[in-house]
């Protein structure tokens, strides 16, 4: 099935398939950022039990120092790099719906 014109599309700016729009770029970055954040979150975590410094009334598995600021910075850098690869692949035509259209 060939791609139809988006004349009747309610959101033509957000759903163009020939290139990335501003809205599409922001959405892709936010999704990548959260995916990378959840992957980076467990890096370098030492629990209170491992550090033998359990505070009374707290969970022994709670991190001693989660270093969230550093992880946010690492996440932002990695997400920006991944987004750049995604953007280049989409804009170069290597990744897109037209490539998979068999009709």
Image (tube, grey):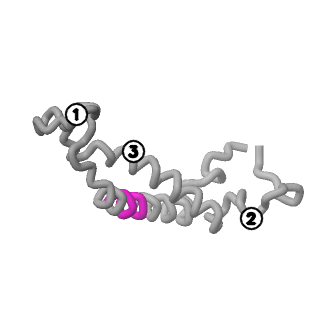
Residue 27 lies within the magenta run: no
Closer to viewer: mark 2 or mark 3: 3
Q: Residues within 10 Å of mark 2 (few under 14, many from 20)?
A: some
Q: What residue is at 78 percent from the left and 61 percent from the top?
A: 12
Q: What is the magenta segment's predominant secondary structure?
A: helix
Rendering quarter of residue 18: bottom right
Using residue 61 as the reference point, say whether residue 36 is left or right of it: right
- State which mark lies toward you, 1 or 3: 1
**Sequence order check: which comes first, mark 2 or mark 3?**
2
Secondary structure type for disc 3: helix
Q: Residue at x 72, y 57 (%)?
A: 15
User: How many C-alpha atoms fall within 10 Å of the one at disc 3: few (<14), some, or many (≥20)?
Assistant: few
Element type where label 2 sits in the image: loop
Q: Position of residue 69 (x, y in %)?
A: 32, 60
Can residue 2 be spotted in the picture? Answer: yes
| Bounds of the magenta segment | 74-80
Q: Which residue is mark 1?
A: 56
Q: Which residue is mark 2?
A: 13
The residue labelled by disc 3 is 38
The C terminus appears in which quarter of the rendering? Answer: top right
Q: Residue furthest left?
A: 52
Residue 94 seen in this snapshot? no
Q: Secondary structure at mark 1?
A: loop
- Spatial CA distance of label 1 from label 3 is 28 Å
Residue shown at 28%/34% (left/top)? Answer: 58
């Amino acid at each position: 099935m060939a791609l139809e014109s988006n004349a009747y599309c309610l959101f033509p700016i957000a759903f163009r398939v020939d290139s990335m729009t501003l809205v599409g770029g922001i959405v892709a970055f936010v999704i990548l950022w959260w995916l990378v954040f959840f992957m980076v979150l467990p890096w370098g975590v030492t629990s209170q039990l491992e550090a033998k410094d359990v505070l009374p009334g707290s969970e022994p598995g709670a991190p001693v120092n989660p270093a969230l600021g550093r992880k946010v910075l690492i996440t932002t850098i990695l997400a920006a790099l991944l987004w750049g690869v995604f953007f280049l692949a989409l804009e170069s035509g290597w990744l897109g719906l037209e490539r998979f259209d068999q009709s």
